[in-house]
Image (cartoon, rainbow, N blue to C red):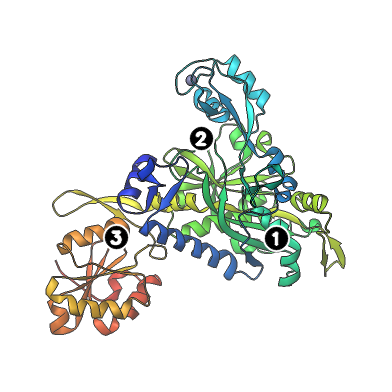
Amino acid sequence: MAINIDEMAVFCKKKGFVYPSSEIYGGFSGFFDYGPLGAQLKRNIMNSWWKYHVQDKEDMVGIDGSIICNPKVWVASGHVGGFGDVMVACKKCNENMRADHIVEDQLGVQAEGLSSEDFDKLIKEKDVKCTKCGSDELGDCKVFNLLFKTFVGPVEGDKAVAYLRGETAQLIFANFKNVVETSRLKLPFGIAQMGKAFRNEIAPRNFLFRLREFEQMEIEYFVHPDKEKECPYVDEIKDYELLVYSAEMQENEKEPVLMKASVALEKGIITNGWHAFWLVTETKWFEELGACKENFRIRQHRKDEMAHYSSDCWDLEYKFPFGWKELQGIADRSDFDLQQHMKHSKKDMSIFDEETKKKVVPFVVAEPSLGVDRAFLVFMFDAYSTRKDEKGNEVTVLKLNPKIAPVQVAVLPLINKLQDKAREVFATVKNNFNCFYDKSGSVGRRYARMDEIGTPICVTVDFDTLEKGVLTLRNRDTAKQVRVKIEDLNEKLNLFFAGEDFENLGTAVEK
Ligand SMILES: [Zn+2]
């Protein structure tokens, strides 16, 4: 990782990955638009997630709920009453700030779990100042609700108020009975959903990291309440190594330790096999799509951070240029959510368990919830690299995994005269791969452009193509070249995208 978050935002804009939303009107804080390459990369990330978590799993199904739903859902979930950040306003310049941000930034303390009253005390006693004007005259802390309100139907007013969903997860709970009855699921099982969610953040910051409109990929994983710790899949993940940062290590100011999942379980650091299973599963998903494993760790919540319904919680964290930050939390939620919806809807949420022949309200043992935009940042940071070109200039190479690269194959005629042949070649591969045709500029410039946007393979049509029927393939990461026959092109590309080494695809070109 060679650049900071602001430089990443500049790079993303310059190359057509992400733009500030409605930029011609000055942008809109907390909102971004994905450009041609970003839209494709984001779609590839989401498709990979869906395949890995839903299509490839026997115990998983997916739904796609509505963004606006009956507002009672958000009353039952607790979002209307308690989904908020503590806000403090400057009396001098009226700047609104998140109390946890200014306390963490200025006092260097962990602010998670603190109440409005705690913040008031800290801000007054420790002389915390306005981040904008430096005044120490700050008002009282207030909880600010993060749900976006809207009106449904032609009349505005309290009765027409509804909310843009603050997370996708509640739609999973609200649809729980429908899904179970129509999918013939047996415990344990998971329900997944991807889609937009909205939070009226007081202080959006760090580019795509904290947004007001964002996209989530969420799972609620349900187990029998009496078998909360019986994970049948522990054997599959036991040898996988994780960088573990337990509550005990944090309290005693020790460093995180790399250990196998089985060791963390044996030592009682991770107490539930399901948590180990999901922490490994999620880290592996990132790793298989090209993220650098050394930038990930799992961190246990300390007692003062934990939600009241949760008995243990682990975060999967990533080392961003602005510090270790949460990507997703793996927590016990017991039957908290289903019970809330049972109470508020007066509908039975219990299901019949064939094994015990009893009706049970399942427990949620893990809620792996990941922001697509955060995952996008992870892949961009881990792919971003530079190298010296032949003239000694530093050039950018975006080493995105071929599985998610927005352009997989670029077809380039060496000179304009070869266009007819190049279009023929393009036509033979475009149905199998996400391809791009580029005819303008020197071939060196075109290679450099493809390196910058992460295209793993360039196929060049040159005079040998006309005379001998061979093409030159160029690898993004090594700049090495091999020659292959036209009729073998699709097969060779398939091999490469299935993991074959580039050098084995054809005859090496000597420079
Ligand atoms: Zn101020």
Residue ID for mark 2: 203
Could you tell me which residue is drawn at 67 percent across and 56 percent down?
171
CB at mark 2 closer than 8 A to ligand 1?
A: no
Tell me if mark 1 has few (under 14), some (14-19) or many (20+) residues whose alpha carbon lies within 10 angstroms of its own.
Answer: some
- Residue type (three-letter) at the residue carrying disc 1: Cys
Q: On screen, 433 above or below 290?
A: below
Q: CA distance from mark 3 to mark 1?
A: 40 Å
Q: Is residue 153 left or right of residue 186?
A: left
Q: Are marks 3 and 1 in contact (CB under 8 Å)?
A: no
Q: Mark 1: which secondary structure?
A: loop
Height in image: 102 above or below 283? above
Q: Is residue 185 left or right of residue 30?
A: right
State the image coordinates of residue 456 (x, y, percent, origin top left). 32, 64
Instruction: Determine the CA span between mark 1 and mark 2.
Output: 40 Å
What is the three-letter code of the residue carrying label 3? Answer: Asp
Q: Disc 2 marks which amino acid? A: Ala
Whether residue 239 is visible, yes or no, is no
Residue receiving disc 1 = 231
Q: Position of residue 80 (x, y in %)?
A: 69, 41
- The residue pinned by badge 3 equals 477
Q: Nearer the viewer, residue 464 or 6?
A: 6
202 vs 277, nearest the viewer? 202
